[in-house]
């Protein structure tokens, strides 16, 4: 009898051990896969059981949380949602997150390990800390000036502090209210479908996720390449460029909108935007020289993040000579985001030292204690300081005496470059209007802001489209706001 009791006890111990092993397997080895299983609602319930941390602009929170009383308890709210949507993105219980809400999700949701009171505390407790705060570099007055300036037209504005890389304004138009997507239910699904089906693409962040042919605004990059390489040593010397200019190896004639471009100097060509001169100079620089320069400005870089990913600005690595000529005036396959073109202007304004752009100034705990502070860092030395100084002078001449007069600001030194970029089949589309610029108060030691503006639907009358007419006034308003702050 005792023998049978011992056997039964041994079997019970074996079964108990098997249960413990299985429990360990489920809770430790398979915990991650079970957590990620779509059928597991516990993570979603826990995620929305507490208010989400906030995104801060100009010392004020532009996000919040409201108690829905539902199983997924706290929904995201937004203050001035359309104004800041290109910065915040959305946080949706149905469709996930985007932009800063996505890039900083672990901080905002409270799951980041650096928010925990002790190392590995969240892993051990299987809990989470209160959501932290993400403090942005955006200046509210500049954001508002850019938003109001676009006035609902399709386009974008990016503004950068040249000396640090801080992104001071990031606007995409038309915009949308991310609060419409926060919760669950039919209304959210209807809003999602409406926004995604709209031909105006309000959820597209045109400032960092859309690339455009930069047109004549790109001529600043070509001028930098020419001066750095020694192709041009005197900006006021005749260039030798013919007018009309037949693209090398073709019978295609490149036109000018401006007059007086035959044999014009680089200075005159920048001032009045002569296509023939810059295309001629770009061919002299050559593909290798152009690629070297555009790379230092940030083109062809797939790794740029602010911290959200930025679309790659393109300059083809393999081209025929005629294609190099067109690319040198911002046409052919050359494309750029508005942020990229703001970086071009910022590099000129900062003496050739291009700072890495960033949108998050610091990350804090919910009580405001700083955990991470962003330190400005050099991205590339885009050009020689002497070249940057010459380009500053040329861009000032554009505003004071050339095509960019609409950007002039009393009491400030302003440099700019207009651009009108052809696009569409046979260039039949309404051209995009560009303006890139920088501004320095008369009593300041260095420029305080660099701006890029692109307007897609600048005018219904093709001949009236121009960067100086459509985009420069918007840039001026943004720069004026920067100078006031």
Image (spheres, grey):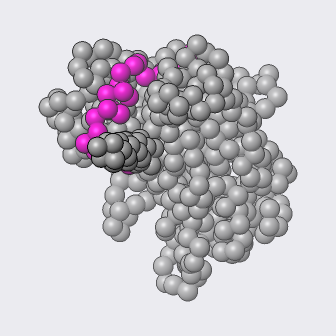
Q: Quadrant of residue 236?
A: bottom right
Comparing 52 with 22, the one in front is 22
Residue farthest to the front, as pictured: 1
Q: Is residue 322 above or below residue 474?
A: below
Q: Position of residue 52 (x, y in %)?
A: 43, 22
Q: Quadrant of residue 62?
A: top left
Residue at coordinates 32% horizontally, 32% vertically from top-left?
A: 42
Q: Is residue 484 above or below residue 216?
A: above
Residue at coordinates 51% horizontally, 22% vertically from top-left?
A: 129
Residue 478 is left or right of residue 1, and the answer is: right
Q: Specify the quadrant that holds the N terminus.
A: top left
Residue at coordinates 56% horizontally, 81% vertically from top-left?
A: 320
Comparing 56 with 138, the one in front is 56
Q: Position of residue 456 (x, y in %)?
A: 39, 47
User: Which residues lie in the magenta part?
Assistant: 32-59
Residue 387 is left or right of residue 177, and the answer is: right
Residue farthest to the left, as pictured: 186
Q: Position of residue 294 (x, y in %)?
A: 66, 61
Judge whether residue 370 can be spotted in this image: yes
Q: Is residue 212 above or below residue 165?
A: below
Residue 36 forms part of the magenta stretch: yes
Residue 456 forms part of the magenta stretch: no
Judge whether residue 457 can be spotted in this image: no
Q: Position of residue 94 (x, y in %)?
A: 27, 36
């Amino acid at each position: 009898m005792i023998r049978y009791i011992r056997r039964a006890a041994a079997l019970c111990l074996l079964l108990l051990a098997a249960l413990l092993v299985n429990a360990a397997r489920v809770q430790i080895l398979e915990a991650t896969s079970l957590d990620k299983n779509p059928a597991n609602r516990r993570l979603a319930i826990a995620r929305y059981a507490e208010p989400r941390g906030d995104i801060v602009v100009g010392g004020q929170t532009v996000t919040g949380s409201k108690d829905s009383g539902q199983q997924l308890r706290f929904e995201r709210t937004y203050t001035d949602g359309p104004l800041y949507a290109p910065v915040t993105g959305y946080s949706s219980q149905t469709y996930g997150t985007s932009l800063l809400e996505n890039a900083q999700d672990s901080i905002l949701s409270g799951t980041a390990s650096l928010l925990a009171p002790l190392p590995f505390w969240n892993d051990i407790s299987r809990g989470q800390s209160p959501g932290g705060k993400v403090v942005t570099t955006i200046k509210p007055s500049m954001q508002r000036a850019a938003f109001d300036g676009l006035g609902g037209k399709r386009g974008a504005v990016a503004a950068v502090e040249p000396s640090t890389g801080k992104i001071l304004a990031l606007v995409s138009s038309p915009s949308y209210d991310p609060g419409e997507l926060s919760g669950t239910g039919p209304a959210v699904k209807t809003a999602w479908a409406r926004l995604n089906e709209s031909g105006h693409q309000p959820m597209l962040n045109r400032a960092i996720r859309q690339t455009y042919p930069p047109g004549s605004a790109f001529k600043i990059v070509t001028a930098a390449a020419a001066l750095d390489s020694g192709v041009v040593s005197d900006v006021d010397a005749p260039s030798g460029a013919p007018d009309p200019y037949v693209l090398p190896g073709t019978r295609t004639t490149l036109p000018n909108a401006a007059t007086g471009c035959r044999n014009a100097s680089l200075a005159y060509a920048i001032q009045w935007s002569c296509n023939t001169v810059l295309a001629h100079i770009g061919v002299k620089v050559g593909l290798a020289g152009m690629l070297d320069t555009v790379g230092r400005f940030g083109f062809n870089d797939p790794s740029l993040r602010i911290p959200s990913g930025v679309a790659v600005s393109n300059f083809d690595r393999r081209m025929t000579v005629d294609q190099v000529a067109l690319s040198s005036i911002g046409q052919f396959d050359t494309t750029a985001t508005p942020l990229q073109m703001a970086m071009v202007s910022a590099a000129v304004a900062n003496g050739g030292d291009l700072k890495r752009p960033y949108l998050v100034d610091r990350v804090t705990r919910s009580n405001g204690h700083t955990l991470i502070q962003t330190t400005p860092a050099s991205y590339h030395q885009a050009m020689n300081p002497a070249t940057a100084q010459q380009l500053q002078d040329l861009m000032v001449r554009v505003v004071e005496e050339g095509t960019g007069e609409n950007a002039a600001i009393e009491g400030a030194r302003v440099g700019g470059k207009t651009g009108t970029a052809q696009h569409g089949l046979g260039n039949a589309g309404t051209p995009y209007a560009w303006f890139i610029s920088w501004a320095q108060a008369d009593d300041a030691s260095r420029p305080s802001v660099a701006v890029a503006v692109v307007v897609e639907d600048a005018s219904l009358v093709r001949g009236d489209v121009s960067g100086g007419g459509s985009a420069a006034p918007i840039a001026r308003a943004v720069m004026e706001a920067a100078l006031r702050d």
